[in-house]
Image (tube, rainbow, N blue to C red):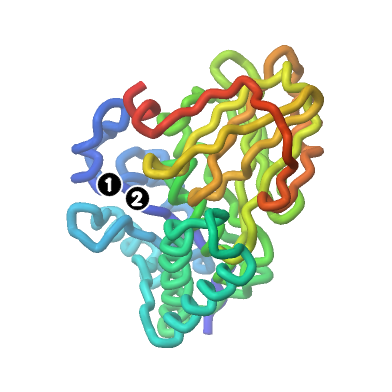
Amino acid sequence: MREINKIIFIIHPKSERSLALQPYPYILPSGDEYINDVKRREILKKEAEDEKTAICILQRGRSFKYRAEKLVKFCEKYFGDRCFDSPYDDSIETRLLLLEDLERTIKYRGNYEEWIPYEIWSSNNARRWAEGLKKEMKRRGYFFDPGRVEAECWGHIWSGCSIKYGMFMAKYLGLSNPMKRNVEIPLKNTWPIKVKKFVGSYTLDHYVQLFIFIDDFCQPVAEYIDGLRGVWEHPHIAIVPIDSKNVDLFTIPPNEFLRVRESKSIDDRIIADVGDGCHPAFTIIVGKNITLSEFVSAVKKAKIIDRIDRPKGYINSTYHVYSYYEIEND
């Protein structure tokens, strides 16, 4: 058995056919996503040189029009049998795990609106992929140590599928730490805030990941996301010790079908949803009249708690709610 030390997960890559149907500004050069420009092709080629690095492509669907077949062929050429294409497992053993996940979700998160079917559906997909990957690796003579393996997540939409599947897959593969997020790729046209620089990321309590950016107006920007959590575990909120006068809050849903709850604040702190790509909204915190160092210091001190324990009585701050329609047609 050969050990794999690193796994790159490409979440829902867009095929050349899908890209051709996208309106501006999504139109990209010909070819499947990730191989339609030189820089990304060279990154993949370089990663493939290490025989202990594998790549796992999780397709958007089984229909031909959604599948990034050219990307798969490219990765098979350079990674060989270390390329895994949507290793889906629907065995009885995996179905029993899905049942256990559902029962635990009802037990720990209740039977009312604290969770929604979209979460369990997303979790089921991740569970089938995780079990399928473990079985297919074993069949091909590979294994990985969950405590040592490095996992990296690529995805073109920052606030949706790459976030939720990165979170769930890390949990169901038994990883000790959240996946590393590839920040460069998704931010160009899926945020209401135009960012020009990635500053850094931090892992906080409960495996919540904090990401810091600089926007086009040279203002600091922050977002919290869940990095390692099962569907039965409560999502989180971040209570941030920062003056509400020094921030604007932008709230976006993980997809256009889900309701948005606004972020809230009082004078000396704000409450931000920790996004997970499923249910809580994503809260984008933009600093104003505050230095980068002061901003980073404050958002790193956030108290992370279960969302069900959120404080009562907070008043609304100035916030902006964006739908995907508004973002895509900006």
What amino acid is labelled 2 in the image? Answer: Pro
Q: Residue at x 76, y 34 (%)?
A: 240
Q: Dot 1: few (<14), some (14–19), or many (≥20) neighbours within 10 Å?
A: many
Is residue 316 shown left or right of residue 68?
Answer: right
Q: Residue at x 57, y 45 (%)?
A: 275
Q: Residue at x 62, y 51 (%)?
A: 226
Residue identifier under label 1: 32
Q: 168 or 283: nearer the eye?
A: 283
Q: Residue at x 75, y 16 (%)?
A: 290
Tell me which numbered mark, 1 or 2, is placed earlier along the sequence: 2
Q: Is residue 141 visible?
A: no
Q: Secondary structure at mark 2?
A: loop
Is residue 265 shown left or right of residue 150?
Answer: right
Q: Secondary structure at mark 1?
A: loop
Q: Quadrant of residue 233?
A: bottom right
Pointers 1 and 2 in contact (C-beta within 8 Å): yes
What amino acid is labelled 1 in the image? Answer: Asp
Q: 4 or 312: nearer the eye?
A: 312
Residue identifier under label 2: 13
Q: Name the disc covering residue 297, or none.
A: none
Judge whether 175 appears above or below 306 on screen: below
Where is residue 63? Give x, y as percent.
20, 60
Q: 14 or 72: nearer the eye?
A: 14
Where is residue 111? Give x, y as percent.
54, 64
Judge whether 305 appears above or below 78 on screen: above
Where is residue 203? Give x, y as percent.
71, 48
**Numbered disc in front, either 1 or 2:** 2
Where is residue 316? Give x, y as percent.
65, 26
Which quadrant would the C terminus be assigned to in this image? top left
Q: Is residue 328 visible?
A: yes
Is residue 295 shown left or right of residue 151?
Answer: right
Rounded to the nearest angstrom, the CA distance separating label 1 from label 2 is 8 Å
